[in-house]
Amino acid sequence: MTDTFVIVGGDAAGMAAASKARREDSDLEIVVFEKGEWVSYGACGLPYYVKGEIQSLEALVSVTPQEFREERDIDLRTGHEVVAIDPDERTVTAESDDGDVVQPYDHLLLATGAESVVPPIGGVDLEGVYTLGSMSDGKELREYVARARSDESFQQPDRGPACRYLEDCTGPVAVVGGGYIGIEMAEALAANDFEVHLFQRGDRVLKGFSEATSEAVAAHLRDQDVTLYLGSEVRELAGSGASDDSEGRSPSSNRTQSDDAGEVGAVVTETERVPVDMVLLGTGVRPRTALAENAGLEIGPTGAIATDAYRETSAPDVYAAGDCAEATHVVTGEPTYAPLALTANRHGRAVGQTVTGTPSEGGGVAGTAAVKAFDVEAARTGIIDPDEARKAGFDPVSETITAKSRAGYYPEGGDVTVTLTADRDSGRVLGASLVSEYGEGAVHRSHAVVGALEAGATVFELENYDLAYAPPFNTTWDPVLVAAKVLG
Ligand code: FAD
């Protein structure tokens, strides 16, 4: 009898596992339950869909349900939400419009992803408050943009202080959260002529990057007429009917007027009340662990599902991969939570290989991430935060350098700023954060540092890495090598 491999969640981790398992074993029965209608989609492209650079949601799909079913012989069941796992009986229970299904498994993968965090403040249920975590969120946001742009009542150049930058602005709108989704959405909304107000609780945007990167990105956002409110915790979202004459008043005095009914009208912080027509909450994600928790699976210190190096959970033959699960940090060797697309794909693929007889780890993670903010690009990898480094037992030392992105005599080019962090005693490279104009290579340069992190290399070794050089791409000593020399 053939084994049955059941997968919960039909996106990056789940479909990578299904596809790899099918390639390795043509007889295996593979059943995928996906609660939504979309599978194998690139949520990473959603900000560009909302922006209008990508014309259809279908364009974000790598492999269609039909292709999975007909070409890869995968029993893909969309519209099926798994509501329970029984690790003793080795079954999952799924609900659908056609009734419940109890499906036995020999191997089970949880690839349930992450969900958007909605902060516990008043007004989050008001109309006009959005998150961007799913294809349907993207659809709703794009529809909002289309409505707003075509509705003349949104074209109000004379809205007073909130509309002080753009002559024919639409909006204003708020982005809450200065992480990468918040920043990508600020760009998407500004590109559609919305006047964008970005609120960040901490004192800088992109807090996982270096201060130099955060400052460069913040300066560029301001240049692009995004109004930044740093160190501004949003206390509540007020309804459009709520009083707007509260300048200098404590936000709590308006709390009763922001009942969760009607449309959003303002963002209220400790010191400000900013009128807006729409709010995008980019306040982080949390792993979807309810199924695992209810089945008694171990949750790790990061709050995600705990796994071993092969992504096997505390229950035998039950695996977890992608945004719902922990991974191992390449620098510390400790569990970490890095909800990113490549990790989901790699670890899903590794599980597909493991369950078909070739145990596979799928590698660690360095938290390598990139973001485009209008005409600037930024990347980070490894450990940058000194407190995080000290907690992991290192004595961190950092240098920030700014160097030319291409040969000085070459007609194009700009600057690249690199912050490189190493351990003082051993010289081991711990992490880096880079920023440049878009197209000047901050992101691709970070990959040299990723190589150093994976190898456990020192700055002295990194300094001698044999990187490519030609005038249109860099200087003889690439900025990453310059940073290593300065730090070494
Ligand atoms: P998901 O993609 O979340 O998929 C999980 C699936 O499981 C979902 O389809 C869900 O419907 C389904 N599901 C959940 N529970 C159940 C259940 N009980 N039963 C059945 N089905 C269930 N990452 C990057 O590396 N770079 C980027 O630039 C980037 N940009 C992003 C931009 C946005 C706007 C978003 C939202 C994410 C971005 N990411 C980015 C993150 C990246 O999309 C995720 O890391 C990746 O999608 C994780 O894949 P996954 O399969 O683990 O989870």
Image (tube, rainbow, N blue to C red):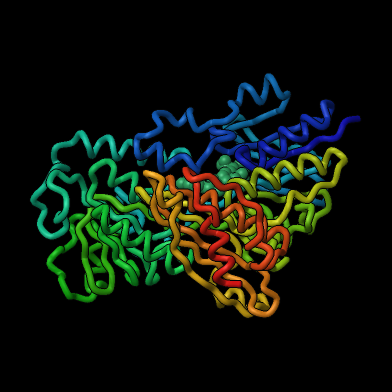
Question: If the picture is divided into quarters, which one holds ligand 1?
Answer: top right
Residue 57 or residue 30, whichever sits in front: 57
Tell me the quarter of the image containing the N terminus.
top right
**What's the residue at 49%, 64% (across, down)?**
209
Q: Quadrant of the C terminus?
A: bottom right
Depth check, front residue: 444 or 55: 444
Residue 133 visible in the current orientation: no
Pick out the residue farthest to the right: 1
Report how many numbered discs are placed on residues in the image: 0
Q: Give above or below for 76 relative to 364.
A: above
Tell me where residue 326 appears, x and y as whole percent. 67, 58
Picture coordinates of residue 464, whole percent (x, y): 66, 60
Q: Is residue 202 left or right of residue 351?
A: left
Q: Judge from the rendering whether residue 230 lies leftward or rightward of residue 22; answer left or right.
A: left
Q: Residue at x 68, y 35 (%)?
A: 32
Quarter of the image for residue 216 reads bottom left
Q: Residue furthest front?
A: 409
Q: Position of residue 289 (x, y in %)?
A: 63, 56
State whether residue 352 is above or below residue 448: above
Nearest the eye: 442 or 476: 476
Image point (66%, 36%), residue name: 15
- Could you tell me residue 114's position as x and y percent? 56, 52
Name the residue rendered at 37%, 39% in the picture.
50
Q: Is residue 150 visible?
A: yes
For the residue pair 448 and 73, the one nearer the viewer reads as 448
Give above or below for 152 relative to 308. above
Left or right, 31 with respect to 152, comes to right
Which image quarter: residue 300? bottom right
Does 247 sit left or right of 387 as displayed?
left
